[in-house]
Amino acid sequence: MHDSIKPTRQHVTILGATGTIGINTLDVISQHPERFSIFALTANNNVNSMFSLCQQFKPKFAVMLNESSAHALLAQLKAIGSDTEVLHGEAALCEVSAHVEVNIVMAAIVGAAGLHPAMAAAQAGKRVLLANKETLVMAGNLFMQAVEQGGATLLPIDSEHNAIFQVMPQEKQPTLSAMGVKRVLLTASGGPFRNASLDELKVVTRTQALNHPNWVMGPKITIDSATMMNKGLEVIEAHWLFNAHPSQIEVVVHPQSVIHSMVEYIDGSVLAQLGNPDMRTPIAYGLGYPERLQSGVSSLDLILTARLDFCAPKLTHFPCLRIAYEALNAGGTAPAILNAANEVAVEAFLEDKIGFMDIPNIIEAVLTSSDIKPVASIKQLVAVDEEARQQASIQLNRLCTRS
Ligand code: NAD
Ligand code: MG
């Protein structure tokens, strides 16, 4: 490339830098040092990982969730003479997302904890690379409004939504049918229990559930994939991202995870995006858009892949997917309640407190006992989230005292 047309470096904040998506993002960024520099890295409480990332990427800011982790990180950084400033707390997460010097925010915190910083990035008009699907599940309408009002550029990172984004017409229209789109087809691997019987599902262990066949991911989304709640959350995510009616979103089980999703047009054409299951592809797409960047992902070997299989999801075995469709159809605060109850149930399963099939039971019980209201504000959604967590804990205690 000619010297005078070198692009200026983009300043990036990575929310959830120590997680699976965070580390993959840093991997892609480190392949393009001339294009990107790290403005801020954030993490929950993993001081040692954060310390080594700060050594390597020299961010202007490092943000830990709590004060004691921030103190511990600062002590380690001072000892090596680092210039990185250490902050803590949710307000600091929002600050480094909305900071005037930032161009790109990778929103890769797991769960509802990612909502406020993702909103802050959207309101500040950043390029938002959205991995944190829970933001759209909880507050899809308000988040999409913030993107529009803030003048942000939203790029979906979830592999399915990134695939759909890639094969949708680039000229936006108010409805899918105005773009000639009939429906979107979300592919699902089916997770580790795709062929399990109902009796087998009742006794699966945490270790079995954490063993995803195709993707390496954080623990919460790995359990969500095993219950297929992940696909349920992704149906809700697709609804908000692509303005798709629930009846226009179909889930197709595709065990090889080679087709990342598809768009069907009214003329019968079905466009798909394919590739190896490696999150660096959608991450590189988001970072470079509309340009394509090297990602380090190896070429898809179709001869080696040999076959692509498809089947319908079994809602009897994976009730979380059904419950998510129901919450989307109910609308209002129902998806936020679903999300909160799911987070509590998954955490309890990861702590070996409940069985695998208790997860959908808890979520359904919480939804049934909750009043669904129209969404009014983020403040209201935070209260709804808190109330649903309390209800889920009550359900959890009932189960634990019974067993
Ligand atoms: P992970 O558990 O590996 O990492 C989560 C990150 O968030 C860590 O850096 C952690 O320190 C931080 N974090 C956790 N709790 C926090 C809190 N309360 N406040 C601030 N920071 C906190 O998760 P992941 O697999 O990287 O997933 C991140 C998000 O991306 C999730 O929303 C997930 O659904 C989505 N996603 C992940 C994948 C994947 O392949 N891993 C694919 C699609 C979407
Ligand atoms: Mg996905």
Image: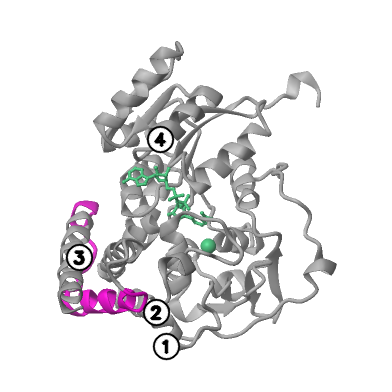
The residue carrying mark 1 is: 199
The residue carrying mark 3 is: 388
Residue 57 position by quadrant:
top right
Give the number of the mark in front: 4 or 1: 1
Question: Disc 4 or 2, which lies upstream in sequence?
Answer: 4
Instruction: Identify the residue at horizontal 70%, vertical 42% (top origin).
Output: 293
Total numbered badges shown on the rendered structure: 4
Question: Disc 4 or 1, which lies upstream in sequence?
Answer: 4
Instruction: Give the Cα distance between marks 4 and 3.
Output: 27 Å
How many neighbours does mark 4 have within 10 angstroms: few (below 14), some (14-19), or many (20 or more)?
many
Q: Secondary structure at mark 2?
A: loop
Residue 330's place in the image compared with 239, above or below, is below
Q: Secondary structure at mark 1?
A: helix
Question: Which dot marks residue 42?
Answer: 4
Residue 331 position by quadrant:
bottom left
Question: Disc 3 or 2, which lies upstream in sequence?
Answer: 2
Instruction: Identify the residue at horizontal 71%, vertical 49% (top origin).
Output: 297
Instruction: Give the Cα distance between marks 2 and 1.
Output: 7 Å
Residue 389 position by quadrant:
bottom left
Mark 3: amino acid: Ala
Q: Secondary structure at mark 4?
A: strand
Kindly check if marks 2 and 1 are in contact, taking CB atoms under 8 A apart as contact. yes
Q: Is residue 376 magenta?
A: yes
Q: Is residue 370 magenta?
A: yes
Q: Choose between 116 and 68: the one closer to the eye.
A: 68
Which residues are the magenta region? 355-380
Instruction: Work out which quarter of the rendered image holds the N terminus and state it.
Output: top right
Q: Choose between 122 and 367: the one closer to the eye.
A: 367
Question: Disc 1 or 3, which lies upstream in sequence?
Answer: 1
Question: Which dot marks residue 203?
Answer: 2
